[in-house]
Image: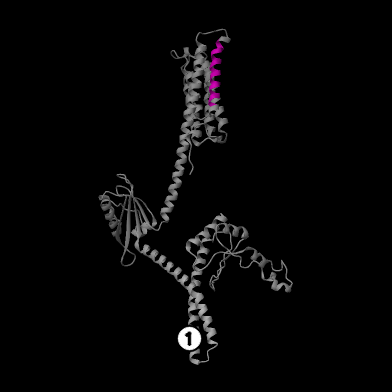
Amino acid sequence: MSRGSAPASTAARPATPADSYRAALRWLAASRVAVAMVLLAFVPLQDAGRFAAELADPAMFERVAVVYLLVAILYLSTAHRFHDRFDAMLVVHALTDLFALSMLMHAAGDLRSGVVVLLIAALAGAAVVSTRRMAASFAAVATLLVLGEATWPVLHGASEAGLTITAGLVGLACFATAMTVNWLAIRLHAQEDIARRRGEDLRRQLAVTSQVVAELQQGVLVVGADGAVTTMNPAARALLGVRAEAPTLGGAGRGDGGPGWAALGRAYAHWREGGAARHVESEIDLPAPGDGTARIRLRFLGSGEPGGDAVVILEDQRLIEERAQQLKLASMGRLSASIAHEVRNPLAAIRHANSLLAERLADPALARLARIVEDNTVRIDRIVGDVLSIARRERAAQYDEALADLPIDLPPRTPWAESNRHLYPIRTSDRDALQAHLRDAGIQTLIHYPVPVHLQPAYAGLGYGPGAFPRAEAACARVLSLPLYPELPADHQDRVIAALRQFFA
């Protein structure tokens, strides 16, 4: 999960401006158009009343205002085309504001005109979306322009008392405004970024939780304090027989979903009346498909807060009993395989001893008894073999399912025959590294066919050397037998599977 760090984020503006920066710059461009239109609106009033006396150079004021308005409209119309050059566009916009407003301030009559307030406002607007260094640079440019305006009368021989001090104070106000607004803006954007990332984390967690709840075999309902069902997974819909929008569990609406829903509503109301404890269990009978009823186990999980939501979990007792039966059968199967394995060796010894004894029996009656022993030992041995074969096939099937997505070749299956899975050999090009990895994990493996037949010493006389049968040699170089025997515990097999997945991860 991503975590934002407020102190680090407030140090500077992000290298890649967020959408909020671009939106703020577009608002600044729109505000620039409005300000330029207001300034231009003063031009027709230059001959009316006392306003004309406040403009030192009305003609220059009009020309600058017209140009400023046209440039502002141009910036507003092209702001969306230069998102990849945000800083350059910001510098152009800010410098345009500073120089245009400085010229308007000069035409209006120097620092004592109200245009200086617009200059500070434009500087503050640029500081909202700029970096700390850029904000300081804009403040320095504004201060130089203000000092230049104060120096202009001196250069033309007309010195006015207090104008330089006013310029210095305006310069200090420019720096204070720019740096303060920039600091506040960076903190605000940092908090916005933290909130955005936490919102994304929350959306991802909600999506994962919704997926998990939807895949659960148990029915899950999230119910508000008023009985309105906000969440219902497919298993709950199947158990309750609800296809459309779920009715409420409170008041008169709980009977709208049929008898099953009404029974659930009564149980929910009883739980609420009992104080809505954190964890309460009960059972109800619901109509089952066909004839009869299904026993449903209910669990009510409260939030512990008055008026909070509640979670209702529904479990079909039939499924619980079936799982218990499957576990019981699996345990009996493992026990049977263990007993069969213990019986097989003594049974082989009895059969061998009976064969030796039958060779020395001359009495037909005793020979007949020996044949009876032989027939029954063969029969028991067949039963033991079948039990062990079934146990091996179950273990092999678990390997097949768990290792199907790994880059290894599993033992093939054929539709016309079923192997007794005496061994479970896999093939991989990283055989030796895999065997070493499993050995380090405490798992023993074997290479049952390390040398192909044509390279065995017994067949050296045939004259076949390396490369004569490349497929057989490649198979022997890649084959590795995993642990497989009837009494293999499930947790041991899980360890083998986990080690294999870890190696290929």
Residue 229 vertical position relative to residue 79 in the rendered view, above or below: below
Could you say which is closer to the camera, residue 223 or residue 306?
306
Q: Is residue 94 left or right of residue 226?
A: right
Q: Residue at x 74, y 72 (%)?
A: 463
Q: Is residue 39 magenta?
A: no
Instruction: Report which quarter residue 158 is drawn in.
Output: top right
- The residue identified by callout 1 is 372
Could you say which is closer to the camera, residue 421 or residue 67?
421
Give the main secondary structure of the magenta stretch: helix
Residue 185 place in picture, x, y as percent: 47, 30
Residue 170 vertical position relative to residue 30 in the rendered view, above or below: above
Could you say which is closer to the camera, residue 386 or residue 11?
386
Could you say which is closer to the camera, residue 370 or residue 486?
370
Snapshot colouring: one colour
Residue 485 place in picture, x, y as percent: 52, 68
* Boundaries of the magenta span: 134-153
Q: Is residue 379 left or right of residue 408?
A: left
Amino acid, disc 1? Ile
Q: Please, what secondary structure does the residue beneath circle 1 have?
A: helix
